[in-house]
Image (spheres, helix red, strand yellow):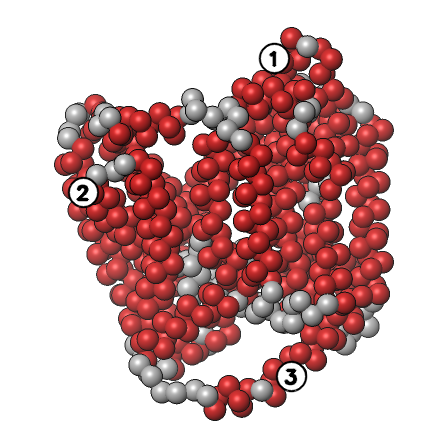
């Protein structure tokens, strides 16, 4: 047990971001951490609690009309938990695969006298703790939202707290079992550079298609009514895939200790099966990966013989783009994540049916009404800002170098050029998605060409500003010590700080635009010009900051 605890601590520490020793930076990061908590974690918590609470309240109203549906009171909570489990599996598989098979600690840990079961259990626990923080937050919010409507008591509170920390186990167990079988019996994933990206892309697209097709333009009232009656096939299917969720929700909704015991037994049984498989399959799978690594080293001379001299700047840009495209951890988190936003927005649109607020503002915009023009204008800026910061390309630009950071110091390319190329890589990807979505939105809104041009300029300037902001934050305290690529992003506080700052700026500018446009009645054309000028000035200032203070930060990093 002592060895297990030490291993868990070691694996957790390997994923943490190093803390700065400078007092100014400590205060700076403490302030940013507080901002991130206020503008990211708290809003996410409130939103989840609100969604589950309102859904449960709607189900209660249906039950009042038809008491025979009383057993379905927890279906709103159940639906939220099932979606959390789905996303836990989608992103958990990548994490489990990297931690179990492609982390740099394997060659150091395997020779030690540690049984495979103990090694896997400690890695699994470390992943559960480090990767489920947001999941714990969403689950806690979902339980609180449900209990606010359905009532509190000591039994449901205790069961909810236990459920928060144990529900993520089953999705991660599924990921672990799938990884063990694939790595032992197939050659689907020979290394960390193939197969996985295709799997992740397919799962996310499939999820989006199924979810969008399932809603079928039902409005929220009909949807809640279906939840109350229990006539949702999706719930039935997911109850078979994640049976523990049904029994936990039933236990909390009905104060059933028997259901809660069944939930614990299902979770424990799944974990035991996983451990039994790991004991038999893990070491052979790791050996096969090691053999592949040897083969790759032998073919390195062939790769070097094919290299050619080229333009330094273009070569550096290709290096940045290939690193993002060919590394599954970076591809899934920095590029693939951009595909989630339209799916989320479409789901929000469809679940409201034809009487939805999005359609209302679009109609206001088409009719040239001031409110619609202002809201669409603010939305274009805010979405561009959040999408740029959420993909973490800019805010991990230095951290991604890791142990290759000396490469930045010794190549014949000055820091200014390197940082600008890193920014260009982020802009190409971030603005590429922004522009694509903007074209689609403008098409459906029948936006005039002049508006399309203005929206494009605003989106580009937002992308430029927040890209250089993310790079500047990463120069202050980059996460250069990591065992695998996923660790460069996991626990990287710069991404959360960048997102928090983007949300603050979006709120301030959004409120300001609304105030001057709706209260002071400044024409929307003038407001657009003002925002463009403001973003241009902000971009120039942050660029100057990166090229001066940011470069000094890099020079001060010891290697």
Disc 1 residue crowd, few under 14, some 14–19, many 20+, Cα 10 Å: some
Residue that label 1 marks: 61
Residue 73, image x, y percentages: 68, 21
Disc 3 residue crowd, few under 14, some 14–19, many 20+, Cα 10 Å: few
Who is closer to the viewer here, 412 or 27?
A: 412
Residue 295 has which mark?
3
- Number of numbered discs on residues: 3
Asked whether disc 2 touches disc 1, contact meaning CB atoms under 8 Å apart, the reply is no
Residue that label 2 marks: 450
The answer to which image quadrant residue 519 occupies is top left
The answer to whether 185 appears left or right of 138 in the picture is right
Helix, strand, or loop for circle 1? helix
The answer to whether 282 appears left or right of 318 in the picture is right
Task: Tell me which label, 3 or 1, sits earlier in the chain.
Answer: 1
Residue 188, image x, y percentages: 67, 67
Residue at 45 percent of width and 51 percent of height = 338
């Amino acid at each position: 047990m002592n060895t297990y605890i030490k291993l868990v601590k070691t694996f957790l520490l390997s994923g943490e971001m190093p803390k700065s020793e400078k007092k100014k930076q400590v205060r700076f990061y403490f302030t940013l951490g507080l901002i991130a908590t206020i503008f990211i974690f708290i809003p996410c918590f409130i939103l989840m609690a609100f969604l589950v609470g309102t859904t449960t309240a709607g189900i209660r109203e249906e039950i009042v009309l038809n008491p025979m549906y009383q057993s379905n009171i927890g279906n709103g909570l159940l639906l939220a938990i099932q979606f959390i489990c789905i996303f836990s599996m989608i992103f958990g598989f990548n994490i489990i695969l990297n931690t179990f098979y492609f982390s740099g600690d394997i060659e150091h840990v395997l020779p030690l006298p540690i049984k495979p079961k103990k090694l896997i259990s400690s890695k699994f626990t470390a992943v559960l703790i480090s990767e489920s923080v947001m999941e714990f937050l969403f689950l806690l919010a979902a339980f609180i939202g449900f209990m606010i409507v359905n009532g509190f008591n000591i039994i449901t509170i205790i069961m909810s707290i236990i459920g928060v920390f144990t529900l993520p186990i089953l999705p991660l167990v599924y990921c672990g079992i799938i990884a063990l079988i694939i790595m032992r019996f197939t050659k689907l994933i020979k290394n960390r550079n193939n197969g996985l990206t295709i799997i992740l892309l397919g799962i996310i697209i499939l999820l989006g298609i199924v979810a969008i097709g399932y809603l079928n333009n039902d409005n929220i009232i009909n949807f809640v009514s279906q939840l109350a009656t229990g006539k949702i096939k999706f719930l039935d299917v997911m109850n078979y895939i994640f049976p523990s969720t049904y029994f936990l929700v039933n236990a909390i909704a009905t104060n059933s200790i028997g259901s809660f015991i069944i939930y614990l037994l299902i979770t424990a049984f799944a974990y035991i099966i996983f451990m039994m498989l790991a004991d038999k399959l893990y070491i052979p799978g790791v050996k096969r990966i090691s053999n592949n690594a040897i083969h790759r080293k032998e073919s390195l001379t062939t790769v070097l013989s094919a290299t050619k001299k080229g333009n330094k700047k273009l070569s550096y840009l290709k290096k940045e783009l290939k690193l993002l495209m060919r590394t599954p951890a970076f591809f899934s988190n920095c590029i693939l994540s951009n595909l989630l936003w339209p799916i989320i927005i479409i789901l929000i649109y469809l679940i409201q049916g034809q009487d939805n607020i999005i359609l209302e503002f679009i109609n206001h915009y088409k009719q040239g009404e001031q409110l619609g023009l202002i809201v669409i204008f603010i939305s274009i800026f805010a979405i561009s800002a959040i999408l740029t910061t959420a993909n973490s390309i800019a805010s991990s630009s230095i951290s991604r170098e890791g142990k290759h950071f000396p490469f930045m110091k010794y190549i014949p390319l000055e820091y200014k050029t390197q940082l600008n190329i890193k920014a260009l890589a982020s802009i190409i990807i971030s603005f590429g998605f922004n522009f694509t979505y903007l074209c689609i939105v403008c098409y459906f809104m029948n936006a005039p060409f002049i508006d399309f041009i203005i929206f494009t300029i605003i989106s580009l300037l937002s992308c430029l500003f927040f890209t250089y902001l993310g790079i500047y934050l990463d120069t202050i305290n980059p996460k250069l010590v990591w065992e695998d690529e996923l660790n460069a992003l996991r626990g990287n506080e710069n991404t959360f700080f960048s997102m928090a700052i983007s949300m603050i700026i979006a709120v301030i500018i959004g409120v300001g635009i609304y105030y001057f446009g709706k209260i002071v009645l400044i024409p929307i054309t003038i407001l657009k010009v003002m925002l463009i000028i403001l973003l241009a000035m902000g971009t120039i200032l942050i660029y100057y900051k990166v090229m001066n203070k940011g470069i000094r930060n890099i020079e001060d990093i010891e290697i």
